[in-house]
Amino acid sequence: MRLVLVGPPGAGKGTQAQYVAVHLSVPQISTGDIFRANVGQGTPLGLEAKKYMNAGDLVPDEITINMVRNRLAEDDAAKGFLLDGFPRTVPQALELDNILADLGTRLDVVLELVVDDDEVVRRLSGRRTCRGCKRIWHVDFDPPTVNGICDACGGELFQRDDDNAATIQNRLSVYAASTAPLVAFYAERGMLVGIDATGPVDDITERAIDALRRFG
Ligand code: AP5
């Protein structure tokens, strides 16, 4: 299956992608994770992307689209993928069509995680991520046994630079202005399925897998 996961910042895309990608036996490809890995390694791409990410703005298309084109051409994506965080705009969606056409394939479905802004702010304010295995935690909703330490691998937990109040508000504005039209675009194409992304993580995973069954 070739799947895109869409939803506002903090909707739980990364959390659900971990489980849904395993269920579908496809790689999870997160543009945010690729950018953050480049920021961490201090690559030229990372240094450029960091300026936009820390402000909560979108990284320019000429950087993002090439990066996705290269990633989708890798062997592990040949039989399917779960894209998390790309496309985020209608122009990116049109470029994704071109990339997939060049690879001789097409997108199957877009899964939207529906969550309101208040919940998003609560989720992002308490998010912690493991430096080692990248497992996502929350100080209240999904706390590790020992504060600041990952249960899964013992790694140190950190708070993302873009999870501060001002940047969260800008990310929500950018989502409303740039990504909400993308949701309408896929709905018009009959490719969108939306699920309620509130409640326990396991229940949302079940809803996601159930919704995807209809797309085969
Ligand atoms: P990206 O990393 O994609 O960030 P985002 O879209 O803002 O989404 P998040 O990763 O913040 O949230 P999420 O939906 O994955 O939620 P999570 O599962 O972590 O992008 C970052 C930046 O990179 C962008 O701002 C931009 O600058 C750049 N970028 C990336 N892609 C780009 C593109 N295509 N074009 C241009 N620029 C791009 O969950 C959040 C928290 O909630 C966690 O603590 C989790 O434990 C908790 N949680 C999850 N589910 C539940 C639940 N059911 N109940 C309670 N808590 C929950």
Image: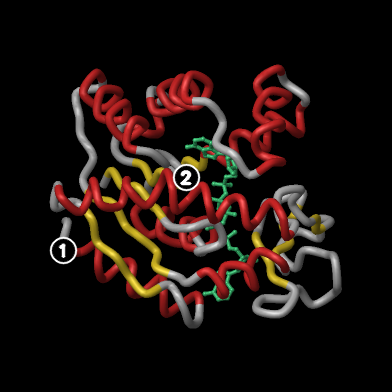
Give the numbered dot on residue 151: none
At label 2, the amino acid type is Gly
**Which one is in front in this view, the residue at disc 1 or the one at disc 2?**
2
Count of labels shown? 2
**Res 74 quadrant in image:** top left
Q: Are marks 1 and 2 in contact (CB under 8 Å)?
A: no
Residue at 71% x, 66% y: name it: 125
Cα–Cα gap, marks 1 and 2: 22 Å
* Classed neighbour count for the residue bearing mark 2: other residues with Cα under 10 Å, few (<14), some (14–19), many (≥20): many
Q: Is residue 148 left or right of residue 86?
A: right
**Res 44 quadrant in image:** top right
Q: Which residue corresponds to mark 1?
A: 214
Q: Quadrant of the C terminus?
A: bottom left
Colour basis: secondary structure
Q: Is residue 122 left or right of residue 12?
A: right
Q: Tag 1's secondary structure?
A: loop
Q: Is residue 174 left or right of residue 135?
A: left
Give the numbered dot on residue 85: 2
* Classed neighbour count for the residue bearing mark 1: other residues with Cα under 10 Å, few (<14), some (14–19), many (≥20): few
Q: First in sequence: mark 1 or mark 2?
A: 2
At label 1, the amino acid type is Arg
Residue at 26% x, 47% y: name it: 1
Regarding ligand 1, which quadrant of the image does it lie in?
bottom right
x, y percent for residue 79: 29, 37
Asked whether 145 or 35 is in front, the reply is 35
x, y percent for residue 38: 68, 29
Q: Is mark 2 within 8 Å of ligand 1?
A: yes
Q: Is residue 69 left or right of residue 12?
A: left
